[in-house]
């Protein structure tokens, strides 16, 4: 009897210990998403609504799923659950930062940045909430320590935890989502990825690789209103990373919104010159915005391979720099960030820029991060370039792109803004730096014969706040701005909406008005001219890849807001031809025939050239030497960010042939770097391939990989990074760096990815001297 009692007591004690350990793992799984959701609520001061309760329910379900995974891992491994927990905390923290920056969960299409050194070192490890992040890490570590006190062979409540999570998910499925409100408030990060994967567009493995968007034909039939330039003007385009019309008080007021943050210098320029209060950014992300602005063509409205990545000058649209070069202009592109990221060096050369300069062009800077130099340093470099251009006897065109307002925000120690923080501090610094730049141009007489256009590549929009209508908040992520400084302008605010792809044809229209301008050699760009008025408004479409939304503005006074796959569309009332003044609540849903008509206009191919069936070959970087940067930034991105959408059966060939040379031929050859080659995809928890190799001055590295895609890959990219350096200054010289994609055959089937390394060799200095290796 005593023996039975002892056994029973031991069994009860074991079950109790297992339940305590299970509760500790529950705590570890639930803490990160719930803690960071609470942090966002506190930071945004949003009132709690019923939809927020659904978001909490979804977070709890996700946390329990993670807890069940942690308990499963704990059965036979001591450190595996702790590694998984650390990854879970990093993902939740990165998601919270993304929500605060972009108003949306991380998409699976972009979550691969969590594996990138720049994102981890520049964003996650430089979080704006280090105290909260540290508290979560410590609390979760204590929970894992407590759970680890139980012996590995004890039975943990995995099944009951998993069952509870699935039950909560089933309950949440009956809760209809509000399409006008931010998705992050209604669902968890995990549920967002499940919904994305289950959408019709994402689940079709036979979906075409490349589907373009509709294109407005050029329309110069409107009434010309400004004073024509006396002579052919220079052109200066200034792109301020992620700034919005919602940040400029006079433009925000025109839309019935209070600017936040308010930028006084841009507001002064808007009041003193020609300002457009309804300038629409047609997509999120820099490469999509720049393509629309410089090529006068729509970006893709669905998440797919950016048109910048697949651009071919023989089949793609003729872009503004090429058209101006044909008119005798000198063309220069200058940005603060590394050129290899998003294929900027390749694209800008292909569209007609004669000089393409990036982060490596600035030997010194007030402040430099992995993302590039600060805004004032960029403008100083631009002044030096313009001084050279002004000495020529021909007109010039320059495009500038800042990066200081990109997270994690690059602002040197500036007493005037030290009391500010985060995006507001970076935006005010950009605002002041721009004002100094414009003043310098004016004092040098540059503005007397230069058309200056100030806008943004994309829009960060308004911060999440309680006093903003949810549809206004959603639309603000596509609310850019445009301020035009012309040689003879007078203050004017234009509220008629224009889009980014109108810019190229507008510039050519303005130049053509000068009596000294030669006739145009080629048609460039589509849309309407910013310098003309039109008797009738037009329908417009734009999208937000982060929010998975597509918008259609009917000029008669109706805005359709749809999910990216058009699985649901709601209509909202708006004043005629004023999309940013649409307000909640929804007035109804689009009928199936209306959705079909919208689908045909937005997404159906208009000609055979818009769906590519042959191979796509992308040159990842040019043949100009790439200096290895010296200084505190350890990592240097050489190229990356192609954003390829790869269906099942696609065959990918990655070929790299690169040599490390001394910067000066007379230097002793004792320089050394470490190179990391990655093929990344947001669908994979780790790189499809990752290899680090040392390379000494005088050596050449040859790499060839072949990958057959076994499951759909989103936002895939080949990334080449310098992770360490020592010795003499050096530079990389590429003989080849290409990625070639063959479309799948009809017999392609799902399965594991097939990765074959066909070549990897480092050729020594002596071997380089032979003809076959030269």
Image (spheres, rainbow, N blue to C red):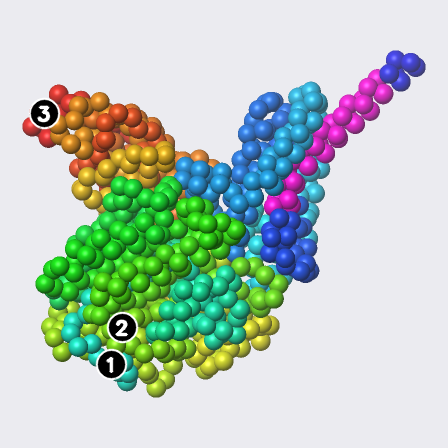
Task: From the image, tell me which residue sits under label 2.
Answer: 486
In terms of sequence position, does the residue under pointer 2 or pointer 3 come before the other?
2
SS of the residue under disc 1: loop
**Residue 34 versus residue 352 in the image, above or below:** above
Q: Which residues are magenta?
A: 7-36
Image quarter of the C terminus: top left
In magenta segment, residue 618: no
Residue 672 horizontal/vertical position (percent): 26, 25
Mark 1 vs mark 2, CA separation in Å: 9 Å
How many residues crowd mark 2 within 10 Å: few (<14), some (14–19), many (20+)?
many
Q: Nearer the viewer, mark 2 or mark 3?
A: 2
**Residue at the spot x=35%, y=69% of the render?**
483
Identified at 22% across, 53% down, the residue is 384
Q: Residue at x 22, y 35 (%)?
A: 732
For the residue pair 59 and 385, the one nearer the viewer reads as 385
Say if mark 3 contacts mark 1, CB within 8 Å.
Answer: no
On screen, residue 302 above or below 558: above
In this picture, is 763 found above or below 159? above
- Say if 433 sits above or below 599 in the image: above
Q: Secondary structure at mark 2?
A: loop
Image check: 472 left or right of 345?
right
Q: Is residue 241 left or right of residue 7?
A: left
Residue under circle 3? 769
Q: Can you give x and y, in whole percent of width and height, for residue 464 in the image?
A: 56, 59
Which is more foreground, mark 3 or mark 1?
1
Q: Overall secondary structure of the magenta stretch?
A: helix
């Amino acid at each position: 009897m005593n023996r039975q009692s002892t056994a029973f007591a031991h069994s009860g004690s074991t079950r109790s210990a297992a339940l305590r350990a299970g509760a500790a793992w529950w705590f570890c799984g639930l803490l990160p998403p719930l803690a960071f959701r609470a942090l966002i609520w506190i930071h945004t001061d949003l009132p709690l609504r019923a939809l927020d309760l659904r978001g909490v329910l979804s977070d709890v379900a996700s946390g329990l799923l993670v807890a069940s995974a942690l308990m499963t891992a704990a059965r036979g491994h001591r450190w595996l659950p702790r590694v998984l927990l650390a990854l879970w905390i990093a993902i939740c923290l990165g998601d919270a930062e993304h929500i605060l920056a972009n108003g949306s969960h991380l998409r699976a299409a972009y979550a691969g940045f969590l594996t990138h050194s720049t994102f981890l070192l520049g964003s996650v490890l430089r979080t704006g909430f280090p105290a909260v992040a540290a508290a979560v890490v410590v609390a979760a570590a204590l929970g894992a320590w407590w759970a680890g006190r139980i012996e590995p062979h004890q039975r943990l409540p995995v099944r009951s935890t998993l069952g509870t999570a699935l039950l909560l998910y089933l309950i949440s499925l009956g809760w209809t989502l509000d399409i006008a409100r931010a998705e992050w408030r209604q669902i968890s990060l995990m549920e967002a990825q499940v919904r994305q994967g289950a959408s019709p567009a994402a689940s079709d493995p036979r979906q075409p690789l490349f589907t373009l968007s509709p294109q407005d034909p050029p329309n110069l039939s409107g009434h010309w209103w400004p004073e024509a330039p006396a002579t052919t003007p220079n052109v200066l385009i200034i792109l301020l990373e992620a700034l919005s019309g919602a940040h400029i008080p006079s433009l925000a007021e025109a839309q019935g919104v209070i600017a936040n943050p308010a930028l006084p210098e841009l507001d002064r320029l808007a009041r003193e010159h020609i300002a457009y209060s309804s300038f629409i950014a047609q997509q999120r992300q820099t490469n999509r915005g720049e393509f629309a602005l410089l090529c006068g063509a729509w970006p893709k409205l669905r998440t797919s391979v950016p048109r910048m990545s697949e651009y071919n000058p023989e089949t793609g649209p003729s872009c503004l720099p090429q058209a101006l070069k044909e008119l005798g202009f000198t063309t220069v592109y200058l940005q603060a960030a590394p050129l290899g990221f998003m294929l900027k060096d390749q694209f800008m050369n292909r569209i007609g820029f004669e000089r393409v300069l990036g982060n490596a062009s600035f030997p010194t800077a007030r402040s430099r991060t992995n993302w590039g130099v600060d805004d004032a340093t960029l403008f100083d470099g631009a002044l030096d370039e313009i001084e050279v251009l002004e000495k020529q006897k021909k007109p010039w065109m320059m495009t500038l792109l800042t990066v200081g307002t990109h997270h994690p925000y690059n602002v040197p120690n500036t007493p005037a803004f030290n009391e500010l923080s985060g995006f507001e501090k970076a935006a005010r610094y950009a605002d002041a730096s721009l004002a100094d730049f414009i003043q310098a141009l004016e004092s040098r007489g540059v503005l007397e014969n230069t058309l200056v256009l100030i806008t943004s590549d994309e829009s960060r929009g308004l911060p999440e706040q309680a006093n903003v209508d949810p549809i206004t908040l959603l639309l603000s992520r596509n609310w850019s701005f445009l301020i035009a400084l012309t040689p003879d302008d007078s203050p004017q605010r234009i509220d008629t909406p224009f889009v980014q792809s109108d810019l190229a044809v507008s510039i050519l229209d303005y130049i053509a008005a000068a009596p000294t301008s030669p006739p145009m050699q080629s048609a460039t760009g589509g849309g309407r001219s910013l310098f003309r008025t039109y008797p009738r408004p037009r329908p417009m479409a734009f999208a937000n890849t982060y929010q998975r939304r597509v918008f259609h503005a009917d000029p008669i006074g109706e805005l359709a807001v749809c999910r990216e796959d058009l699985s649901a569309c709601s209509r909202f009332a708006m004043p005629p031809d004023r999309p940013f003044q649409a307000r909640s609540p929804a007035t109804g849903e689009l009928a199936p025939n209306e959705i079909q008509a919208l689908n045909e206009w937005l997404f159906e191919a208009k000609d055979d050239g818009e769906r590519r069936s042959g191979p796509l070959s992308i040159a990842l970087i040019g043949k100009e030497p790439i200096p290895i940067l010296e200084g505190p930034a350890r990592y240097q991105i050489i190229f990356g960010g192609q954003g390829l959408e790869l269906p099942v059966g696609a065959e990918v060939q990655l070929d790299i042939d690169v040599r490390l040379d001394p910067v000066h031929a007379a230097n002793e050859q004792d320089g050394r770097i470490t190179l990391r080659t990655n093929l990344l995809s947001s669908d994979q928890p780790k790189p499809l391939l990752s290899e680090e190799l040392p390379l000494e001055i005088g050596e050449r590295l040859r790499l060839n990989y072949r990958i057959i895609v076994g499951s759909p890959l989103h936002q895939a990219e080949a990334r080449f990074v310098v992770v360490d350096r020592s010795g003499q200054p050096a530079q990389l010289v590429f003989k080849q760096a290409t990625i070639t994609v063959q479309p799948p055959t009809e017999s392609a089937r799902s399965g594991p990815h097939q990765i074959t390394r066909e070549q990897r060799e480092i050729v020594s200095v002596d071997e380089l001297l032979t003809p076959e290796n030269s």
